[in-house]
């Protein structure tokens, strides 16, 4: 079972007679002994004073078979039977608490009026299950640099990398500063509300703490984001019965026009592959040419090859402009589209299927010369 921080949200909330600043930090720790409920809270109260601040620690455990999140946490602080502070609707967002894991949180109340006095803290929690964020992705911490304390705020500039095969967004950052006994002495938070990170991409963010007097023995910072829902655009394939070439289009209107007006010539073969138009790696135009000699089409994502064809083969190829966007070079998680040259008719054949690629190489090597990946499709 991994030990890690999960994420952080920070906000201001009004309680009974007191304006409270609180923040929540989650850290996955081993499940609590004897926990048997869907969400369990430690039986012992864990709170302590530091100056005028009341710090409250707690944890919840997911004892089901499905991920859990976000978690709603409620607090009540009483002194001599009087309610001094309440937070009935605190939502601490964590994208994903895995089955068997626990989320450790930390809350801070600014209560100078009753600082240091014995109080009773009641904590309850519940969680959405199954999680609303089951596609959460862990980001890799690449670097962490501590800055000087300014205005009582400790800051770490952190750089994270998306090592997944998916574009992610809305990263949330959390962290804990611990002493030599693993006691939490400060919680850290960062936010990337409008951030989107492509596969292999990096993102830098300032992560803040609010305890300038802390002397941490260990600092652990973590970030998690959710996968961007892909916007998929199909690329349709036709077989030209007259010359044995293939035609590709990402336009449903053009597909329907060819089917309706050129069905005698073109056999519709369906979707050849899909392009994720929301993936920032798909930012290179795929240029299309029409071969006036044999009626086939040629596609390239290389601006150099495009210009070469225009400059040297303009008599043969009519440039039709960009067809759609692809990834011009290899990228994390990108799917290659393989290109073949048809030695019989001078056309080109494209496929994103490694199985089809191998079949053509194995069975039609006399006709098709394999040229390797022509471009890639960011997923």
Image: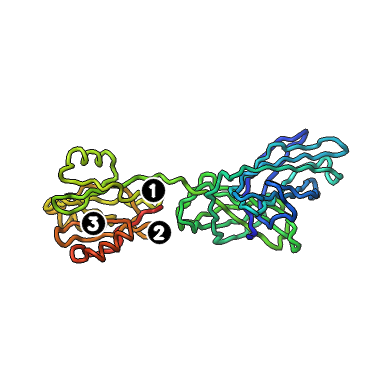
Give the foreground label among 2 and 1.
1
Query: How far across and how far down the image is residue 170, in percent?
Result: 53, 46
Q: Residue at x 29, y 61 (%)?
A: 357
- Within 10 Å of disc 1 (Cα), the crowding (few <14, some 14-19, many 20+) is some
Secondary structure state at the residue bearing disc 3? strand
Q: In terms of depth relative to the viewer, which is nearer, 79 or 165?
A: 165
Label 2 sits on residue = 331
- 222 horizontally vs 229: left or right: right
Whether residue 38 is visible: yes
Secondary structure state at the residue bearing disc 2? loop
- Within 10 Å of disc 2 (Cα), the crowding (few <14, some 14-19, many 20+) is many
Q: CA distance from mark 2 to mark 1?
A: 14 Å
Q: In terms of depth relative to the viewer, which is nearer, 81 or 55?
A: 81
Give the foreground label among 2 and 3.
3
* 2 or 1: tag closer to the N-terminus: 1
Residue 349: image tag: 3
Q: CA distance from mark 1 to mark 3?
A: 21 Å
Q: Residue at x 72, y 54 (%)?
A: 32
* 2 or 3: tag closer to the N-terminus: 2
Q: Point out the residue furthest to the top here.
A: 17
Q: CA distance from mark 2 to mark 3?
A: 23 Å
- Label 2 close to label 1 by CB (< 8 Å): no
Label 1 sits on residue = 276
The coloring applied to the image is rainbow
């Amino acid at each position: 079972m991994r030990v890690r921080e999960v994420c952080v949200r920070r906000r201001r909330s009004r309680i009974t007679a007191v304006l409270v600043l609180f923040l929540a930090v989650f850290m996955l720790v081993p499940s609590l002994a004897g926990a048997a409920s869907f969400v369990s809270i430690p039986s012992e109260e864990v709170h302590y004073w530091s100056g005028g601040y009341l710090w409250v620690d707690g944890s919840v455990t997911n004892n089901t078979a499905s991920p859990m999140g976000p978690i709603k946490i409620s607090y009540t602080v009483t002194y001599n039977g009087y309610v001094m502070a309440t937070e009935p609707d605190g939502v601490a967002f964590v994208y994903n608490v895995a089955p068997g894991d626990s989320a450790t949180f930390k809350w801070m109340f600014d209560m100078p009026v009753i600082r240091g006095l014995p109080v009773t803290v009641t904590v309850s929690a519940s969680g959405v299950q199954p999680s609303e964020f089951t596609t959460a992705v862990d980001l890799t911490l690449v670097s962490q640099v501590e800055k000087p304390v300014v205005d009582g705020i400790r800051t770490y500039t952190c750089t994270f990398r998306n090592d997944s095969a998916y574009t992610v967004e809305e990263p949330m950052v959390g962290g804990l500063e611990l002493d030599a006994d693993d006691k939490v002495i400060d919680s850290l938070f960062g936010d990337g509300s409008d951030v989107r990170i492509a596969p292999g991409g990096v993102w830098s963010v300032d992560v803040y703490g609010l305890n300038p007097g802390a002397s941490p023995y260990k600092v652990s910072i973590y970030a998690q984001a959710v996968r961007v829902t892909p916007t998929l655009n199909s690329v349709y394939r036709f077989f030209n019965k007259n010359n044995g070439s293939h035609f590709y289009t990402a336009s449903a209107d053009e597909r329907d026009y060819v089917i309706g007006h050129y069905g005698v010539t073109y056999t519709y073969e369906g979707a050849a592959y899909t392009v994720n138009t929301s993936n920032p790696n798909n930012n290179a135009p795929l240029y299309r040419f029409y071969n006036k000699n044999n009626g086939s089409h040629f596609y390239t994502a290389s601006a150099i090859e495009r210009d070469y064809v225009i400059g040297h083969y303009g008599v043969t190829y009519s440039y039709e402009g960009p067809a759609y966007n692809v990834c011009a070079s290899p990228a994390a998680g990108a799917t290659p589209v393989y290109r073949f040259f048809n030695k019989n008719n001078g056309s080109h054949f494209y496929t994103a299927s490694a199985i089809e690629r191998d079949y053509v190489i194995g069975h039609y090597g006399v006709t098709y010369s394999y040229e390797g990946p022509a471009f890639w499709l960011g997923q």
